[in-house]
Amino acid sequence: MFCIVKKRLLAKDIYLMEVEAPRVAKSAQPGQFVIVRVGDTGERVPLTICGYSDSDGTVTIVTQVVGASSRKICALNEGECFTDFVGPLGCPSELVHLPLEELRQKSVLFIAGGLGTAPVYPQLKWLCEQEAKADVIVGAKTGDLLILQDELRAVAKNVYIATDDGSAGFKGLVTELLKNLVEEQGKKYDLVVAIGPMIMMKFVALATSAYNIPTIVSLNTLMVDGTGMCGACRVSVGGKTRFTCVEGPEFDGHQVDFDEALRRQSMYRQMERAADCKCVP
């Protein structure tokens, strides 16, 4: 069993959990994910890794209550255990494969939308450990939905905040803040890594294409069983069919067919709503 050693509320319906999983913690790399399960008949849920500590033997995940399975996960408390906690799965970030000197010379910008802040954090932390700090834009609808701000500031070169209502930082979308940084502040970036809602990543990729900035996106929200067996995570990248679970979750954002991905993402929406209705008394 995989016990929860720490649980913290980050924002409304968003929880951070540190889980005892020594074998996963020892092998985990930035960009990878785990599959968790609550109960013997529980659904397999893929979750990107938010942090890991080989010395403590723990892996950190962040989950938002959006449906029946995430509700069961978030209902667990410290001292309780996951039935399964499998990983690390998927391919690590491309950044971990770069020679150290090349990595340190790159100017990288991360763009995190909502819960996408969680998988962005371990990549920023890893870069900081390699003495290659990067900038990050964090977007949310309102300031009270921002998460992990202190953690990001500890490892990022610059943290820029964008909220739809202007309640924190820049008022507007992350793409508008990106435009401000590039066009008005004269920032130059060699690479953009965007993780967040599919629609956000689509428009980030369109914006960076205009600036000719290579862009990586994470399609983790497409995953269902986490092994590529169910086929739900199929996506067209550069005209070829790829499987997010086993070949991703990160891909070239300028090659992803986002319209197809958005359609695929909505395939199970009615089933998810029905399951959630049964879960809520």
Image (tube, rainbow, N blue to C red):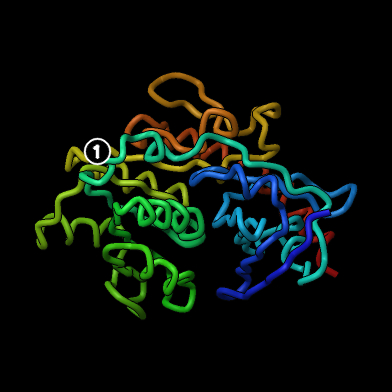
Q: Position of residue 33 (x, y in %)?
A: 59, 45
Residue beneath the point at 35% across and 50% down: 130
Residue type indicated by callout 1: Glu
Position of residue 139 in the picture relative to residue 264 (left or right): left
Residue beneath the point at 28% across and 72% down: 171
In the depicted structure, whether residue 53 falls above or below residue 260: below
Q: Which of the 4 image quarters holds residue 68? A: bottom right
Viewer-side residue, 102 vs 258: 102
Position of residue 258 in the picture relative to residue 232 (left or right): left
Q: Which of the 4 image quarters holds residue 224? A: top right
Q: In which quadrant is the N terminus drawn?
A: bottom right
Residue beneath the point at 24% across and 38% down: 102
Residue beneath the point at 44% across and 54% down: 120
User: How many discs mark residues in the rendered view?
Assistant: 1
Q: At numbered mark 1, what does the secondary structure look like: helix, strand or loop?
A: helix
Q: Position of residue 272 (x, y in %)?
A: 72, 51
Q: Position of residue 249 (x, y in %)?
A: 51, 38
Q: Position of residue 94 (x, y in %)?
A: 40, 36
Which residue ends up furthest to the right in the rendered image?
A: 40
Q: Which of the 4 image quarters holds residue 225? A: top right
Which residue ends up furthest to the front in the rendered image?
A: 55
Residue at image mark 1? 102
In the depicted structure, whether residue 19 falls above or below residue 220: below
